[in-house]
Amino acid sequence: MNLILFSDEDFIGGRSAVLRDRRARYVIEVHRARPGDVLRAGKINGRLGQARIITVDPEQIRLEVDLTEDPPEPLPVTLLLALPRPKVLSRVLRTITVMGVKRIILFDCWRVEKSFWSSPRLDADRIREALVEGLEQARDTILPEVELRRRFRPFVEDELPALVNQKLAVVSHPGEADVPWSPSSEDIVAAVGPEGGFIPNEITMLEQLGFRRLSLGPRILHVEAAVPALLARLGDR
Ligand code: SAM
């Protein structure tokens, strides 16, 4: 945890805040914090700064919080991610958050197992947990938005044209890249497929909307590896 991330409910008045949960345990057990120590802090969807420890009790910590800095610049990428298997989902969401993406759309397609959609890992609380862990790791405060699209065709036909409008759009797909990738300062819409890959018809539909294929090399990467590899490349401007 590289940042103690506060939410409105942690504040007890003015700049005073109290922590009682895993953050308090982390500060006590890992930081071995004492009164007077200063930690990096931030507020969800707010600013960054410092928190000075006032008191440490076995069940809670009281801190004085001073937030004066802006969070880091987001990565201007909207990520369309075929819903991965539940075990992978939380890890991938954390990684995407660490890399600075602020809009994530989890979508269905042919090779997404339908049972994945009933996983408890898609509950809003579980998703938020993964996003918050990503923010704590990256020292960021702005929570990404996560949206779910349970039907591929209506998503692609009715929604994607407006989303892609005037933006650079890429679909990460093993094989020869359609167009060689060069760094760009444009906003980007990027799609990553499911474990079994996109079927040809899905790639065609995306290409008809202007998506260009982007290859990450000759190796077939797990989704967990493909996502950061893709975002690192798109972030290289
Ligand atoms: N057998 C599948 C195929 O050939 O498409 C492999 C799918 S891979 C496990 C899951 C997703 O990660 C792919 O749909 C793609 O979006 C991305 N991916 C994996 N390796 C890639 C590569 N070398 N280049 C571009 N994208 C890749």
Image: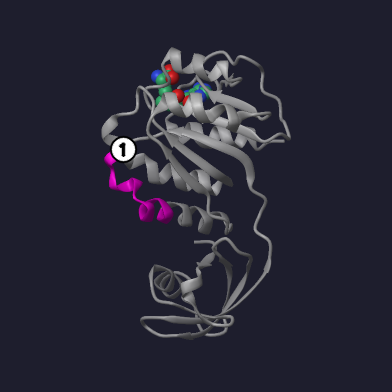
* Left or right: 85 in relation to 169: left
Q: Position of residue 62 (x, y in %)?
A: 49, 83
Residue 127 among magenta residues: yes
Residue ranking furthest to the front:
158
Quadrant hosting residue 111: top left
In which image quadrant can residue 114 be found? top left
Residue 3 belongs to magenta span: no
Label 1 crowd bin: few (<14), some (14–19), many (20+), radius 10 Å: some
Report x, y in % for residue 116.
30, 36
Mark 1: which secondary structure? helix
Residue 127 image offset from top left, x and y in percent: 40, 50
Residue 23 versus residue 177 in the image, above or below: below
Residue occupying image coordinates x 54% and y 61%: 2
- The foreground one among 74 and 60 is 74
231 above or below 195? below
> Which residue carries the number 1 mark?
117
Task: Please give the name of the residue rendered at 46% of the width and 56% of the height, measured from the top-left corner.
Answer: 133
Q: Nearer the viewer, residue 66 or 118?
A: 118
The vertical placement of 112 against 79, above or below, is above
User: What is the magenta range?
Assistant: 117-129
**Which quarter of the rendering shows the C terminus?**
top right
Residue sitting nearer the eye, 138 or 152: 152
- Main SS class of the magenta portion in the image: helix
Which residue is depicted at the point 71% across and 34% down? Answer: 186
x and y, in percent, of residue 208 in the image: 56, 15
Say whether residue 69 is left or right of residue 104. right
Q: Is mark 1 within 8 Å of ligand 1?
A: no
**Of the residues shown, which amino acid type is indicated by label 1?**
Trp
On the rendered structure, is 53 left or right of 114? Answer: right
